[in-house]
Amino acid sequence: MPRALIGRTVRRLRAERGLTQAELAARLGISASYLNLIEHDQRGVTASLLIKLAEMLEVDLGQLSGSAERKLAAGLREVFADPLLGADAVPAEEMVELAGTAPNASRAVLALYRAWRVAREDAGGIALPSGRRLLLPNEEARDFFDEHANHFPALEAAAEAIAARLAASPHEMNHAIAERLRRAHGLTVTVLPLAGALRRYDPAARSLALSEALPRESRGFQMAFQLALLEARDALEAAVAQASASSPEAAMLIRIGLLNYVAAAILMRYSPFLESARTLRHDVTALAAHFGVSYEQACQRLSSLQRPGERGIPFFFLRVDPAGNVSKRFSAAGFPFPRHGGSCPRWVVHTAFAHPGEIDVQVSELPDGAAFLCIARTVDAPASHWGDPRPTHVVALGCALAHASDVAYADGLDLAEARVGIGLSCRLCERPDCRSRAFPPLEHRLALDPLTTSASPYRFEDERKKG
């Protein structure tokens, strides 16, 4: 657990609750001087004391882990490293301090930066042809899911109620959903060729058409999506209203994302899925086979198991295409995804494209020393016709190294020796002599020498050491 952030988090939560150091120390059964040392990161926190802190401050352990502050600090670093802002250099320590002591102000800075980027892109001629301002609804939707750690209790409850009415085992679920749609909603499900679509619902004809190109598990997911649309509407619309989306497009993206969430929760009920995940030690292939779902669906479900009192491992989930474009991103693990630009080419998320269909495992270490166990595998969507390239993505799952012993993919790995150093992105990474570097770091001057050819495409000077 990152000590550099725990003290600030404890201090902020104590102040928000109007407690003095002496009052909180008395409740914890420790001295005020000891608590003062903890709050200034000069003493570690034992597991038992951490549990007491969570109880006294009325938060879950995740809020005390510092993962949220670490993500905020990574976002601030991206902001202040942008040379177009013309801002004075901000030391990393100040960014960490801001994220830990003023998270609301930090989020406001990130929101302002996103708005400035949109305005800059519009001014640069990237506005839509209609002249309408580009509001990046996909980023707004991603932020919404990120703020909720990809877990929605009300939607889990709605999915549980639907699954209880189906009363089917995982391998009977497709048939049970089709029967529920027919008997309760008068809706006929057919499988046939669909030009340019995978699913088409006709409310007037009471028919649901599924593309014959879809594999069995994807047909089941699309039927579960339809059932969620019909039977979880109240919980769904309440969640969408809570998002307070800034545009109809952002609201619709959030709505579709939440429908996908409910569909997954119907097919993979929370408690049975969590129990199986623990029993199978988070072997995704085995989980997918047990619940009759796809590899990607099982990965994404693992990233949502954050029910208070019944938490799974906090995983992050990512889906990326060969060009590096991210189409899905959920992080309960506190992994600091770069918000703008590409990620590190050394990361297993990108190297997995070289091994189609295989599960690649990597112990990824960030520049601040935080380490994550990451797995990645390519997944292919069906081609629409002969000659049409099959859409290929890599889906990745990862967790903090502290959970590695509970994950099958860590078996046989020397977690200390197997670490691969990665950065957030080339422009923010200060690792020297990286042969995969695509851009020089923004905060350093290039060291150019025609007499020497180095292994790294860009050599640079460390300005801090020069002083």
Image: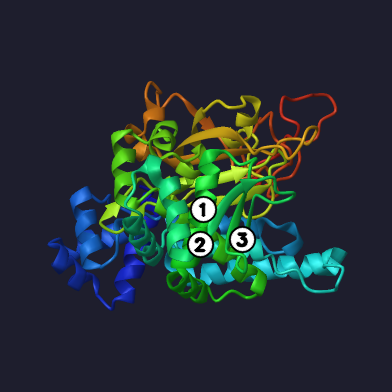
Q: Does residue 145 show up?
A: no
Which label was assigned to residue 258?
2
Q: Earlier in the sequence, mark 3 or mark 1?
A: 3
Q: Which residue is mark 1?
A: 223
Q: Which residue is mark 3?
A: 201
Distance from the alpha carbon under mark 1 to that under mark 2: 15 Å
Task: Of the two numbered discs 1 and 2 on the same chain, state the one appearing first in sequence.
Answer: 1
Q: Badge 1: few (under 14), some or many (20 or more) residues near its Cα, within 10 Å? A: many
The residue depicted at 78 percent of the width and 32 percent of the height is 386
List x then y, in percent, for residue 206. Answer: 57, 64
- Please tell me which residue is depicted at 50% across the width and 63% down the height of the picture: 186
Q: Left of 345 or right of it: where is 100? A: left
Q: Mark 2 belongs to which amino acid?
A: Leu
Where residue 190 sits in the image (x, y, percent)? Answer: 59, 50
Which one is earlier in the sequence, the residue at label 3 or at label 2?
Answer: 3
Q: Nearer the viewer, mark 1 or mark 2?
A: 1
**Foreground: 214 or 396?**
214
